[in-house]
Image (tube, rainbow, N blue to C red):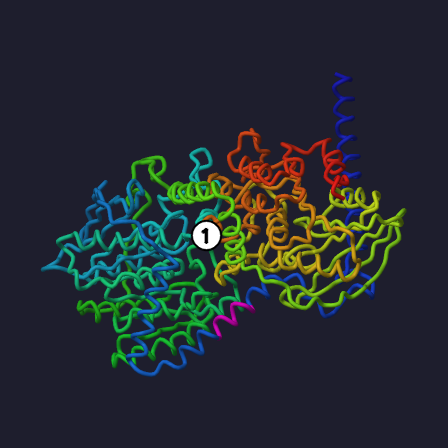
């Protein structure tokens, strides 16, 4: 008994001592990190007022590029005067929408079946499952008024980002009011919501990824990497819902409407822009403008953004203008987080095309006070809009209704498609399409003479890489003396004029070579990078360690917390990366440009014999792109990089922090192993390669993509210049020794 008590006391004391040591380490680390700050430190020399907003540099740069693109669009729109002008613009928008969203899959049998019928006094509900694609099940409910005298108008209802989908009280209230007024209503679950959770876990009783917006962005990122979008899947679900409505004998095919709020407003605007069978559309609490969106809350989750949407010349107004002269109603509130100013500006633009068609009464915007909510006045405006334009006159007064319970609204046996029916998910469908692209890519690799030049051209275009122009003279902000070397602190200017702080670690006895060291947490990212940088300095290398935009002193930004190095489903913001998707660029391409800028600065500032590059984790894609475009980087070392963009797409559960370094659309024409192969015959070290989930890759020697890299090095007679090692551990120092060793040619 006494021994147990002593053991327990020892454990407690050990825990206290461990906590104390940990706190001292953290305090020391924080103090040391501040010492290494260049523009945001505590001393008067490295606390620059000009850069108080430096942590938002990345988002601001991406947004400024978006504003330039939007300015060009506005200038074009301002010259549209005649109906012929507007009709030409509508044709352009239809073509753009098809190009950046499609191609849609072929129309296959819906295989719709009624799973349950709920009888009420004045209406009945048919719970229905249909397949928008083979075995891609859509849960829905069809509300049919009892007193129909002939074919009736029908409204497709799309829900916003509620966990329960269209079953929420807010959405039921509007749907049942429409039913009371004689409309047939079909409500469908968007993917990731209601009974269509894509990552549902029985034991957890919910999504293991998180909320509906998390589900959307998590799989939507994989779609973007493949050159597709989540919007494509959700639009197609809606188009097939219209197909189902038109198959019902109760429905008048000439009187189809669509509405939804928030995320449902997004779907409403999208589906109505694509499907001309929809006569009247009333998106609520979504339409604003990209400029006001980026200026206020930033891009929202994946399905609310088209792949390269802004760079293709689109804005929110186009979704409504392309419908003219069919009736459209914008429903807004003045305190919504979707900017009311943007909504008003968009409405003014949209009204011009309706004026050109001489149908000004077919477009209107209503607004009421309140936040991101449904108000009585707005609901009644929506009822009146459909009553007028779907030729179903009546009283638009909002009425009290009896909300249906959870059990009454259940469509599938278990309440989830994944446990009731199985079938496809967005992940599985996207992976299948991506696999086909990978197979085509692997076939192209058989001829490296044509393949590798194509890869470099595609990587430049898709990553949005820009060749650096004039290199800004660096600004010196201080020096720290260490045993055997000095640390000089500088900043230069990046692509967008934002600061790029960096440390220049200069050994007392230089060998004339420089190592450019990239870490995802920036120049002072913790103990490990400092130890590695010191290892090089102690061997005579000068080391330059930057805070690439979005990291260190220039990050993470008010919208982004992705720099927390997590490998689970803690909060990770996709919004900044999504901004790059909209403008047709990538954060990796921008950072690669700044890496090349630093290489040229080194040539001016240090005049080294050689420049080597070392990158850890998800900075590896940045270094790969930079080195592929800049031959002055003589050697490259990738430490614990993830395998490929394909590895992010093929795994259901990838590490969400990796998304920041992914190039949207890359899998259309290239992947990271292609860039690695393009470095031959330069010396390349890849150590501790992981899969897309951050787990060490097994059977490295048998990996098909890495074998391609080996084969290229072999064909270039540079086998000895390539080292692929399965892990790091105690071997890393020796790997660095071999990687830095002088070659016979030197």
On the question of residue 702 being in view, the answer is yes
Q: Does 403 sit above or below residue 197?
A: below
Quadrant in which the C terminus is drawn: top right
- Identify which residue, 349 or 21, lies in the foreground: 349
What residue range appears in magenta? 64-71
Q: Position of residue 618 (x, y in %)?
A: 61, 46
Q: Main secondary structure of the magenta part?
A: helix
Question: In this view of the protein, which residue sits in the foreground, 364 or 674?
Answer: 674
In the rendered structure, the answer to whether residue 558 lies left or right of residue 70 reads right
Residue 74 in percent (x, y) is at 44, 76
Q: Position of residue 555 (x, y in %)?
A: 65, 57
Is 403 on the left-hand or right-hand side of 566?
A: left
Which residue matches tag 1?
Answer: 224
- Residue drawn at x 48%, y 61% as measured from the top left: 582
Quarter occupied by residue 271: bottom left
In the picture, measured across the screen, residue 718 lies left or right of residue 734, that is: left
Can residue 212 be seen from the camera position used here?
A: no
User: At 49% across and 58% down in the image, what residue appears?
Assistant: 581
**Secondary element at tag 1:** helix
Local crowd size for mark 1, using a 10 Å CA cut-off: few (<14), some (14–19), many (≥20): many
Residue toward you, 326 or 318: 318
The spot of residue 452 in percent (x, y) is: 53, 48
Q: Quadrant of the N terminus?
A: top right
Q: Quadrant of residue 263?
A: bottom left
Q: Residue at x 43, y 65 (%)?
A: 312
């Amino acid at each position: 008994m006494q021994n147990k008590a002593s053991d327990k006391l020892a454990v407690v004391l050990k825990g206290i001592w461990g906590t104390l040591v940990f706190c001292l380490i953290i305090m020391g680390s924080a103090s040391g990190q501040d010492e290494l700050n260049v523009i945001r430190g505590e001393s008067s020399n490295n606390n620059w007022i000009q850069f108080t907003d430096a942590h938002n540099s990345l988002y601001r740069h991406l947004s400024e590029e978006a504003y330039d693109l939007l300015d060009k669009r506005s200038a074009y729109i301002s010259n549209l005067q005649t109906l012929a002008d507007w009709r030409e613009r509508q044709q352009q928008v239809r073509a753009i929408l098809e190009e950046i969203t499609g191609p849609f899959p072929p129309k296959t049998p819906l295989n719709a079946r009624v799973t349950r019928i709920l009888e009420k006094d004045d209406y009945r509900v048919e719970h229905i499952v249909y397949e928008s694609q083979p075995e891609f099940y859509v849960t829905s409910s069809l509300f049919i008024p009892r007193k129909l005298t002939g074919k009736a108008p029908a409204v497709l209802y799309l829900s916003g980002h509620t966990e329960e989908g269209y079953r929420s009280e807010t959405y039921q209230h509007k749907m049942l009011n429409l039913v009371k007024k004689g409309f047939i209503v079909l409500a469908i679950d968007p993917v990731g919501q209601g009974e269509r959770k894509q990552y549902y876990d029985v034991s957890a009783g919910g999504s293991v990824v998180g909320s509906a917006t998390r589900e959307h962005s998590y799989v939507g990122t994989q779609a973007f990497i493949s050159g597709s979008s989540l919007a494509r899947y959700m639009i197609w679900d809606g188009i097939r819902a219209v197909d189902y409505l038109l198959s019902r004998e109760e429905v008048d095919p000439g009187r189809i409407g669509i509405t939804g709020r928030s995320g449902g407003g997004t779907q409403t605007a999208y589906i109505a822009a694509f499907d001309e069978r929809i006569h009247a559309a009333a998106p609520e609490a979504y339409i604003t403008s990209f400029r006001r969106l980026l200026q206020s809350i930033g891009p929202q989750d994946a399905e609310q953004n088209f792949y390269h949407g802004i760079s293709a010349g689109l804005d929110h107004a186009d979704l409504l203008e392309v419908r003219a002269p069919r009736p459209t109603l914008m429903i807004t509130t003045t305190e919504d987080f979707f900017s009311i100013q943007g909504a008003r500006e968009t409405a003014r633009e949209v009204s011009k095309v309706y004026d050109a068609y001489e149908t000004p009464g077919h477009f209107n915007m209503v607004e009421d006070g309140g936040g991101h909510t449904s108000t009585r006045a707005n609901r009644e405006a929506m009822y009146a809009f459909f009553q007028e334009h779907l030729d179903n006159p009546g009283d638009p007064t909002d009425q009290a209704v009896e909300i249906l319970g959870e059990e009454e609204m259940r469509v599938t046996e278990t309440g989830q498609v994944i446990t009731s029916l199985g079938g496809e998910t967005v992940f599985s469908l996207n992976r299948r399409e991506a696999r086909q692209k990978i197979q085509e890519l692997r076939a192209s690799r058989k001829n490296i003479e044509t393949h590798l030049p194509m890869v470099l051209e595609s990587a430049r275009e898709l990553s949005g890489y820009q060749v650096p122009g004039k290199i800004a003279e660096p600004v010196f902000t201080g020096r720290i003396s260490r045993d055997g070397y000095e640390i000089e602190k500088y900043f230069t200017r990046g692509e967008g004029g934002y600061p790029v702080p960096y440390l220049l670690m200069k050994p007392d006895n230089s060998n004339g070579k420089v190592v450019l060291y990239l870490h995802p947490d920036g120049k002072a990212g913790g103990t490990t990078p400092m130890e590695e940088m010191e290892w090089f300095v102690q061997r005579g290398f000068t080391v330059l360690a930057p805070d690439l935009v979005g990291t260190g002193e220039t990050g993470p930004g008010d919208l982004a917390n992705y720099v927390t190095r997590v490998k689970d489903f803690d909060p990770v913001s996709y919004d900044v990366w999504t901004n790059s998707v909209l403008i047709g660029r990538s954060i990796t391409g921008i950072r690669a440009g700044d890496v090349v800028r630093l290489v040229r600065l080194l040539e001016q500032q240090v005049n080294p014999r050689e420049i080597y590059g070392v990158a850890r984790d998800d900075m590896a894609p940045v270094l790969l792109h930079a080195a592929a475009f800049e031959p002055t980087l003589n050697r490259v070392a990738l430490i614990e990089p993830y395998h490929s963009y394909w590895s992010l797409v093929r795994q259901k559960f990838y590490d969400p922090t990796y998304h920041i370094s992914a190039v949207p659309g890359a899998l259309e024409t290239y992947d990271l192993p292609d860039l690695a192969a393009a470095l031959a015959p330069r010396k390349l070290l890849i150590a501790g390669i992981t899969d897309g989930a951050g787990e060490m890759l097994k059977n490295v020697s048998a990996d098909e993509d890495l074998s391609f890299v080996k084969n290229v090095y072999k064909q270039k007679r540079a086998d000895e210049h390539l080292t692929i090692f399965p892990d790091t551990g105690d071997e890393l120092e020796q790997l660095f020794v071999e990687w830095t060793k002088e070659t016979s040619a030197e």
